Image (tube, coloured by chain):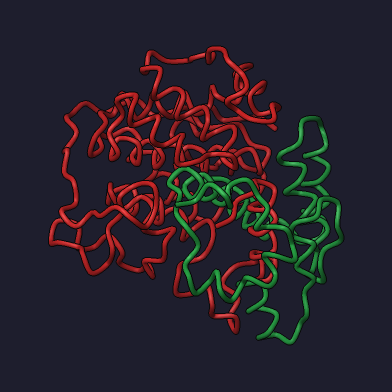
Chain colours: A green, B red
Amino acid sequence: MLLRGSGQHTGDEYDLTAMVEEGAAGGGVAAGEALARYAEAFYEDGNGFAAARDRLHGEIGGEALVDAAGVLAIFNAVVRIADATGIPLEEEKARISADFRGALGIDAYPAAAGKV
Amino acid sequence: MSVDAAAVESLDYRHSPLPVRAGLAGAQQRAWARLAEPGEWWSGAVRVAIAEETRAAMHCAYCRERKAALSPYAVTGAHEKATDLPDVLVEVVHRIRTDPGRLTRRFYEEALAGGLGDAEYVETVGVMATVIAVDSFCDAMGLPRHALPAPVAGTPRRRRPAGAKEGLAWVPTVAPEDLTDAEAGMYDGLSAVNIHRALSLVPAEVTGFFDMDSEHYLPDAQLRDFGTEYRALTHAQTEFLAGRVSAINRCVY
């Protein structure tokens, strides 16, 4: 939702499907494809992560790479807080995000059926 | 890369080829210190053991087998434990670490039936989130992980918020209007949205985790200030990456 809000502020239109589709392009976000690949490679077995990190470093620079590592790290923790406590999405957020959650398949995630 | 073992031990980033913001490193140092101290319901030794078990879960063959199964309940076996924590706690830690997207209320209720208190469960989640965030940062930077801190002696405080209520989540939570003097500052600087309330049965876990969150992500007040970029990573890049990580983990929130 905040990505949509950011786009509305700057006049950019982002393709939100890029957030949920593996191997998708960057959704119109600067260095989006490299950011997506960085996140995907983090969770894969194998040796692809260093290459994904190097590519992202080359595209956004060292200071932003540190920021990206911080975002990836904290969300790797936040998702577990949400899933382990059964905390639901706020009613208002659920209402205004219903269109894209359905379209992107987020409502079909196993955890969607396991909330309160 | 040559690694200064002492720097890793004390949790700083002198060994990092890329400079790490002082605010970010400082938040991790505070989190690491808090990890080792007695909490509300667990001693420092148990908290550090939970952190150790959180790391060990990623190498547990039983967890890998369950993760690959159509249902985690279709597989029987035993965890590869790294600590002497009770089995119910090991099960909680391993499942949350390795298969969070398929957790259900049944999982939580089984933990309680197994003897875990609801506040002990919440503190466990808070400890896990802390170590996962710090470890993941090191992994994402390509740096060695920090040694876990030595436990600090002392007794858990065992204070339960008087205003905690059932209903919002599986775990009891504290609404902003139900705060008492004992946990009055819990939501300072936070908008008290549901994710902030998730750990509120143990207020120190809320303040501790979101102290770290504000440095890794953005402080609440900056999240919707789209006209100002506070980091080298833009708002759009930050939200895109956060959304991609959530989707990979199949997290609805």
- Going 49% across and 54% down the picture, which residue do you hit? B24
Task: Using the image, determine if residue B170 lies above or below residue B231.
Answer: above
Q: Position of residue A75 (x, y in %)?
A: 57, 51
Q: Is residue B58 found left or right of B133 in the rendered image? A: right
Q: Nearer the viewer, residue B243 or B49?
A: B243
Q: Nearer the viewer, residue B67 or A73?
A: B67
Question: Which quadrant of the rendered structure holds the N terminus of chain B?
Answer: top right
Q: Position of residue B149 (x, y in %)?
A: 39, 29
- Going 60% across and 26% down the picture, which residue do you hit? B58
Task: Using the image, determine if residue B19 lies above or below residue B40.
Answer: below
Question: Which quadrant of the rendered structure holds the C terminus of chain B?
Answer: bottom right
Task: Using the image, determine if residue B89 lies above or below residue B185.
Answer: above
Q: Position of residue B184 (x, y in %)?
A: 19, 63
Q: Nearer the viewer, residue B85 or B172?
A: B172
Q: Nearer the viewer, residue B152 or B200?
A: B200
State the image quarter where residue B233 is shown.
bottom right
- Going 27% across and 33% down the picture, which residue do you hit? B117
Task: Using the image, determine if residue B34 lies above or below residue A8.
Answer: above
